[in-house]
Image (cartoon, rainbow, N blue to C red):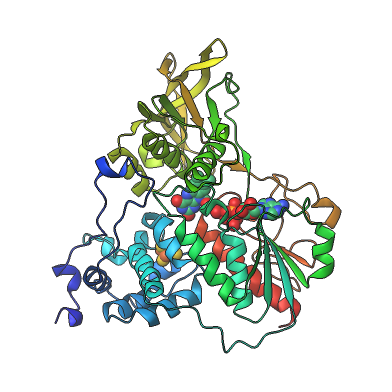
Amino acid sequence: ERLNNDFQFLDVSREGPKKVKASVRKKQFAEIYEPFPKENACEQAHRCLDCGNPYCSWKCPVHNHIPDWLQLVSEGNIIQAAELSHQTNSLPEVCGRVCPQDRLCEGACTLNDGFGAVTIGSVEKYITDTAFAMGWRPDLSDVPKTDKKVAIIGAGPAGLAAADVLVRNGVTPVVFDRNPEIGGLLTFGIPEFKLEKNVMSRRREIFTDMGVEFRLETEVGKDISVQDLIDQYDAVFLGMGTYTYMKGGFPGEDLEGVYDALPYLISNVNHCLGFEKDPSEYISMKGKQVVVLGGGDTAMDCNRTSIRQEAKRVTCAYRRDEANMPGSKREVENAREEGVKFLFNRQPVEVVGENGKVSGVKVVTTQMGEPDENGRQRAEVVPGSEEVLEADAVLVAFGFRPSPAPWFADFGIDLHEDGRVIAPEKPQLGRQPFQTSNDKVFAGGDMVRGSDLVVTAIWEGRKAAEGIMDYLKV
Ligand code: FAD
Ligand code: SF4
């Protein structure tokens, strides 16, 4: 009866999958959400109003057919839902876990109007995880193979999405990555409490079965030459990410005990996964008073990793207020539940130390002023508000700037002034989407748009693959 209830949203309130208790999860590097039980997934999916012109799909960067797969789930049709969901998304189980849904699909749900959005992300994760557990695999047996081969540099979400679309159209993708596992930042960045690493190793097996070739632990430009790739392949896709860490530009950043966020997170992943080459690479916050600087996803991941490493205290200082934080609201809430203390409107001006070692962070208080050119309120310093936060470790999470490879110029790959590769989504007549100034080379993801999201990298990889196919006339 419930399945025919047009007013399910009145009878059933929004409810996500259960979270592991904070006291338990803060000791584990494991996902914090339990799997959605089938009944709940059906019931929640059926809350969808099936709006005539679904705004959720529009706001989803890959334009998932959300109401359609929600309906299939509410009918118990998981395999069909998985087929449909893979028509638009190359890694739906990843997006279901890590997208900031509150500002994408779920933020656009009509039911936000007092009823609570449909739990779109959790259902998306449920579809793929359940279909895989049922033995479903993408079926490419009907795809006629072409003789075309494309080299993909980078096995992050952009590269994987490009490989997915190419292989589904009979083009052989060969993916090169310097890391020992696929995923890019999904594996060597985002911690296990958001995304367990077996999700990516399962994907590697599935992509391999689909016909994608991986050459891991191979750095292009060092272990294999770029010229060889250009000569031996019909096209090349670059999905190399952004890896220059932003600095605060204040005194004391070089003191012992101050770490950039990403090397810190990577050292933890390597430690947990056994990829560590030398135990001295591991950075542990055990017993330390940690101050994390920043307010994005990376800062939240540093906060929650420090908690799990048994830091004595973790304080996150951010220069704007909570409403202006760039990170996902869900992760801020999760961090708070796990014991992170937030200090909003605090701008660091100096890392202070004794005998070359950090002892604290000098901050000033800010207040929110007029919006800047991006529409975000400026943080204005309150005079005379200096204070020192005690710390014996500081994690700097101010984001990333582009890291163009030195060989781009040799191959005529042009850059924007800030170092991003020029590869427009909407190109001039006669050019393909995401084609660089070298006709044979395409690019997408963080290296083109600047550091952003998993789902936007997937979108760019998929669109670039379509551009490559037009260029190759397949
Ligand atoms: P990447 O994921 O960076 O992948 C690039 C790959 O290219 C890497 O594997 C690298 O090894 C490889 N590579 C580069 N150069 C070479 C070379 N010369 N030879 C061989 N291989 C090479 N986004 C979200 O949506 N939700 C989140 O919760 C979230 N959390 C994040 C947390 C952290 C700590 C960080 C750092 C980012 C987070 N992001 C999140 C952002 C997201 O991870 C990125 O936007 C996304 O991974 C970008 O994808 P990409 O494919 O462009 O690049
Ligand atoms: Fe929402 Fe992300 Fe899934 Fe799109 S891909 S439906 S934005 S969770």
Task: Classify residue 470 as left or right of residue 229.
Answer: left
Q: Quadrant of residue 152?
A: bottom right
Is residue 243 placed above or below 71 in the rendered structure?
Answer: above
Count of marks placed on residues: 0
Residue 274 position within the rendered picture, expressed as x and y whole percent measured from the top left: 52, 46
Residue 93 position within the rendered picture, expressed as x and y whole percent measured from the top left: 43, 65
- Front-lying residue, 36 or 406: 36
Residue 163 position within the rendered picture, expressed as x and y whole percent measured from the top left: 62, 70
Residue at image point 53% right, 68% down: 205
Is residue 127 placed above or below 366 in the rendered structure?
Answer: below
Q: Quadrant of residue 128?
A: bottom left
- Front-lying residue, 4 or 166: 166
- Front-lying residue, 322 or 332: 332
The answer to whether any part of residue 307 appears in the image is yes
The answer to whether any part of residue 446 appears in the image is no
Is residue 222 placed above or below 171 in the rendered structure?
Answer: above
On the rendered image, what quadrant is the C terminus found in? bottom right
